[in-house]
Structure formats: structure tokens, C-alpha cells
Amino acid sequence: MKVEQIYTGCLAEAAYYIESNGEAAIIDPLRETKPYIDKAERNGARIKYILETHFHADFVSGHIDLAKKTGATIVFGPTAAPAYDVHVAKDGEELQLGNIKLKVLHTPGHTMESTTYLLIDENGNENAIFTGDTLFIGDVGRPDLVQKVKAEITPQILAGHLFDSLRNKIMTLPDEVIVYPGHGAGSACGKNMSKETTGTLGHQKQVNYALRADMTKEEFIKAVTDGLVEPPQYFPMNVLMNLKGGMASIDDIITKGKHPLTAKEFQTAWESMEALVLDTRSKDSFASEHIPGSISIGIDDNFAPWVGTLITDLKQPILFIADDGREEEVVIRLSRVGYDNTIGYLKGGVAAWKEAGFDTDIIKEINAEDFAALYEMDSKHINLLDSRRKSEYDSEHLVGAENFPLDFINHNMAQLDKNKKYYIHCAGGYRSVIMASILKARGYDKLVNIRGGYKALSQTGLKKTKYVEPTTML
């Protein structure tokens, strides 16, 4: 028996490869199929099952493509009703895989069809659970995502189901059972995930707040619904893609997206197709020189989630700029979150753009020490935007900084004054460059990015504060 976790850091997502006696199962595969097919072929195994724990919100699954290429059966848990052929398993059903079994445990709560797969090894022992978004290490799945698709299914209703699923289906298993979750820290599918991506059920019973033995259902519902922030806007659209199917194959998407364009062709496509130009190079490369009107989202960070958060139309035609040799990677990572309309890249990058006689631009920047000197001289007349999330800002921020989270820039941009000069920072510089690029593309020209972000600013001696919950006088 072989169990392998295939972890993708950008999405904080875990897929799984399980193999026994020449048969393999893939749990929650990402959009690209080649890694799973190659792994099975190297091991001389046949992919028999593609097991989905639920209809994912944070990525588009590759299950349909993978099934077409391998002949494997797609399996969902009870109540799932996708618009394509699958095996909808019954609660308690056992799927034979070589010399082992995968038992279907219906565990609604994150979604109604959410399912945990219990691995029973060659000796009949309950060995591991693949929990999807039902149980994480240190957390449980958020119960508010289904409401974006079905308004009548409230977070409180789902949280009640999740309480029952955990108590009746999962916590009754032996403590030594290994927990293999669908996500780790950084995913928006939970709120308190640990950086560890595996653990034992016994340890989770000790440390996971949601598994406290004496917790009432009312306490549980309050705990898992408190403090939830608005999920990224692309989540309900990804759910519908996973539910309805019918999307283009990953091979066709890659072929179309990897189309090289000269500078002139690039410029013509930009204008004629009303495309968005996405610059996937590093924040430093973008700041030092970029194409005016392009948007920076660097591929070497949380690329796909930020694309999904900030680009509101999944069908938006996208042209892109990438470091040489990373073009296919960009197309694949866009497709993971449903952006399938990539139409080509700029061959030769910004250098080719300049050689063709087109203009370039920069993001003005300042280091933390120089900003601190300016701030101490005249803080009252400096407009400082902190682009971190509210929770980060509340934990600690510079006195006088305005919280302007990148997550909600599309909603809040009109609050800014194009005649004012704004200094922008985030935690380390990635998000502030994204914000600066979006604002510049919308006509905000008086912008200065603070290099190194809050990490560098916090070392300058500038006065800091944090949000304090107001008290009510009785």
C-alpha cells in the first residue's frame, strides 16, 4: 500500500495518490492531469477511482479530464448531483482498491455532499481518513460557502450538520487513525488551520478547538461561524464549474494560452479583444519597469488565489508576461481557479516591448528608513495605506495608517482621491505592488510603494498601535 500527499503551496491544497496491488485512486485532483497519470505509469498502476470529497470552491478539479484519459470512475458522496456521469456512493459503501478498501463516510457540514474516505488497510485496520474540507489540522471547514450558491442553506444549518458529522462519523474512529485533510494553512476554506498538513485523530481531539469533547452544538455553531470574512469572489463560480462540468480540456487551454505574440501582435490583441494584461514577474521586476496599464500578480507567491480575488470575470481574455520558460506554468495556474481564456504571452517580455518602440513605466518606491524620516517630520500630511487584511492591521499597525485591504480594492477604490499622494505598504511588498499596479491602471498616479512592507517599517522605531475592542459602560 502506498499513500502520497501531493501538496500545492500556492493554493494550500492537498491531493492524494493511493495505490495497492496495481490499482490507484486520486483524491481531489487539481486541473492538470499529467502529474497523476505519470505517477501511476511510473508505478505500473492503473487509476481506478477519482474520489471527490465535495464540490470545491477554491479550485477547479481535474476529475473530468482525468477520467476521460484513464477510464477511471469519478466518485462523489451521497446527495451529490453533478451534471455528468459519476458514481454517487452510498454512506458506508466500501470501494475495493487492490488489497485495501476505501469506505465512504458521508460528513455534511462544509457542504451537504461533503464526504470523508476511510482507508481500511490489507489487515482490515482503520488506517487513515481523507477528510477534504470537513476536518483540517487545527480547524474544520467553514460552513458559509454553500450559501453563495443556495441562499436557503445558512451557515448555522451547515454548522449543525458539521457538528453531527464530526461527533458521529469521525471522532468515533480510533485515535491512531491518520488525518489527511484537503488544505493547510493559507487556505480561505478555514480560519485557524495549522501549518502541519497531516496528524493523528487522537492529537486533533486534544488540540483542535472544534473537537472539544464537552462542546455543545450551540457552542460549536457559534465557534465556527464567528469571525468569518467574506470569501474570495471566485469561490461560487468554481463551485458551479465543478458541479456542471463542460469546461475546456486542460490540453486545449494550454495550447491556446502558450501562444507567443510579438509586441505588435500583443498590443493589437490587447486593444481588439479588450484583454487584461497580467504581469507575472516578480514585484521588483514589475516596479522597476513594466507595460503601462498592466497588472502585477507575481507567480512566486499566492498567485492563483489573488487572481481569483481580484479579476472578477472568469471569462476575461488574459494576455500575460512571464519569465522565460514559465509560460505553461502561468496558464496551468490560471486554469486551476477557472481562468481558461488565456490568449497568449508577450514573446521576449518587456525588453521586446521596448525594442518595438512602446513606452514603459515604473512604480515609485521608497525604503522604510527614508519613509520613516518623512513620516516623523510631517505625519499629518502623509496618506499611508496599509493593504494587509483587517486581521493583520488590527493585530498591529503604524499610528495614522489607514487600512485599505487589497482583497476589497474593487469595492473601495472610489474612496481614494486621484489628486492625493498615497504611500502603500503590505507585510513584505507583494500585495502593495499589486495594489499600486491596479490603482495606476485606473488613473491613480501619485503612488509610492514602501519596499519591505510592514516587516521593514516595524524595525524603524515608528510608533505602532493595535485595534482594541471597545468596552460598553453599564
Image (cartoon, rainbow, N blue to C red):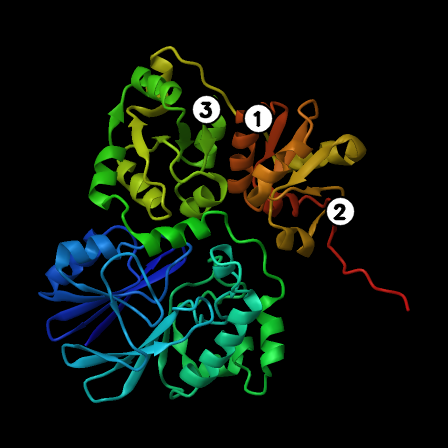
Amino acid type of the residue that numbered disc 3 sits on in the rendered structure: Glu
The N terminus, quarter of image: bottom left
* Upstream in sequence: badge 2 or badge 1: 1
Residue lying at the far right in this picture: please name it: 474
Q: Residue at x 32, y 18 (%)?
A: 263
Q: CA distance from mark 3 to mark 1?
A: 10 Å
Q: Which image quarter: residue 262? A: top left
* Upstream in sequence: badge 3 or badge 1: 3
- Residue 364, numbered label: 1
Q: Are marks 3 and 2 in contact (CB under 8 Å)?
A: no
Q: Is residue 222 above or below residue 405?
A: below
Find residue 443 and report its horizontal and vertical position in percent: 58, 23
Question: In the structure shown, which secondary structural element does the residue marked by tag 3 occupy?
Answer: loop
Residue that label 2 marks: 463
Front residue (pair 377, 418): 418
* Upstream in sequence: badge 3 or badge 2: 3
Q: Which label sits in the foreground, 3 or 2? A: 3
Question: In the structure shown, which secondary structural element does the residue marked by tag 2 occupy?
Answer: loop
Q: CA distance from mark 2 to mark 1?
A: 24 Å
Find residue 85 and report its horizontal and vertical position in percent: 22, 60
Q: Residues within 10 Å of mark 2 (few under 14, many from 20)?
A: few
Q: CA distance from mark 3 to mark 2?
A: 33 Å
